[in-house]
Image (tube, rainbow, N blue to C red):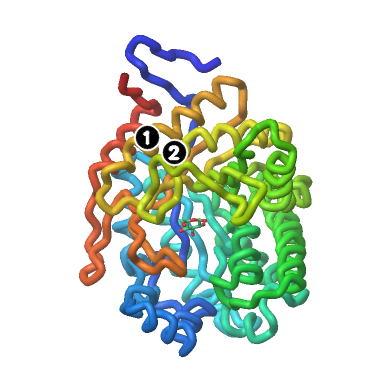
Amino acid sequence: MLENNDQEQNILKFPQSFLWGVSTSAYQIEGGITNDWSQWEMSAKRLAKLRKKNFDYRDFVAGQACDSYNRYEEDAEMVKDLHCGAYRLGLEWSRIEPRKGEFNLEAIEHYRQVLMNLREKNIKIVLTIWHWTNPLWLVAEGGWSNKKVISYYSRYAEFVVAQLGDLVDFWVTINEPSVFVSQSYLIGKFPPNKINFFSAGKAFFNLVAAHQKAYGIIHRHNSRAKVGFTNLVNDFDPARAWFFPEIFLAWLLKFFGNNLFLRLVRGQLDYIGIDYYFHFRIVWYPPFVRNLNKEVTDSGWEIYPRGIYNILQDLRRFKKPIYIMENGIADAADAKRGKFIIDHLRYVHRAIEEGEDIRGYFYWSLLDNFEWAEGYAMKFGLYSVDRQTFQRAPRPSAATYAEICRTNQIRIEK
Ligand code: BGC
């Protein structure tokens, strides 16, 4: 049981060492990157598709993103202003190894500066080694569906760990492998836009091996390192709890979507990192999902805070510390964000009260950024970013989150 729960005032306190943070990724915020995404964004096929829908292609090209490559000090100040004890950020492989086997010392020195600046501010560092984007030379060799990627990724990880390892508190080897595989090789929405079941399978198992190798590499450098990956976990919920086909389908989706990668790497995990965004109410007939959608985000995703609790309960059997590495909402008007955070945290708190080992919560995202195939329209940020001047401004919900992080508690309105 947690101490100091003040029921009368409806204040829910979190454990003393609970880690509050915010998350970003390199490609989504840095700007000025050449990789498989930048190539795809400007490809004739993609541009024609956007033109057909009457979209301005500039809204779908990462370009200068948030210019965080140059404005990282300002970003760190914002993390500090939010009273966050930790910041999850990413590295860009194509900057660090722009040509096969050639490491760019200037780029790694830049990242050292970024991390040192955070440490000076007493902010713990959660570093993502790979968040979906790839150098062009790797793609030319077949990308993640070619077995060679395991040794390429290992060599890259080895370099990064040797150069930056002393500054990192938590490692994320791979961001959401199941999303990468499904979006890139089954749905075809992300590069290499290759709908091929066999490539998907190969990429999946190469990601498993890449994680396993990286785990060993990082631990060889520092036996006390904390290494994990981030897992997108969806709450798959049978529409009728008594109807076998729907129960089975929900179970199947959970098994492949949420748990397979986790099961395969469970021996190489110091913590479980989860990202929660989606609830899917499963029906047995196509399109197999029928959500009630009482409330949705700007991206049309159902707001379903209870789902995070269901997920956390399900993960209990893995018996590892859990960090929520991403949870967030696209909400340009900032009308729902504060409540969204509190409602989710209320369920996180309930899970902790029931004895689950949940050690941190990271809001996605610190600032509005490049939302992959959706471009810039979806605003997940606690801070807005002016697309011309890159000026950052806190939204009202930033104050709400800062207060939560500062006081280590949430206040529930009656
Ligand atoms: C990804 C982020 C993304 C967020 C919101 C997560 O699945 O890791 O890169 O921006 O979802 O879509």
Asked whether mark 2 and ligand 1 are closer than 8 Å, the reply comes as no
* Badge 2 amino acid: Trp
Q: What residue is shown at x 61% (from left), y 29% (from top)?
A: 357
Q: Is residue 325 left or right of residue 255?
A: left
Of the numbered discs in the image, which one, if any, rests on residue 20?
2
Q: Is residue 7 left or right of residue 254?
A: left
* Badge 1 amino acid: Cys
Q: Is residue 106 above or below residue 413?
A: below
Q: What residue is shown at x 75% (from left), y 57% (from top)?
A: 212
Q: What residue is shown at x 37% (from left), y 77% (from top)?
A: 53
Q: Is residue 45 above or below residue 24?
A: below
Report whether residue 366 is seen: no
Quadrant assignment, res 156: bottom right
Of the numbered discs in the image, which one, if any, rests on residue 347?
none
Q: Are marks 2 and 1 in contact (CB under 8 Å)?
A: yes
Position of residue 91 measured from the top left corner of the image (x, y, whole percent): 51, 65
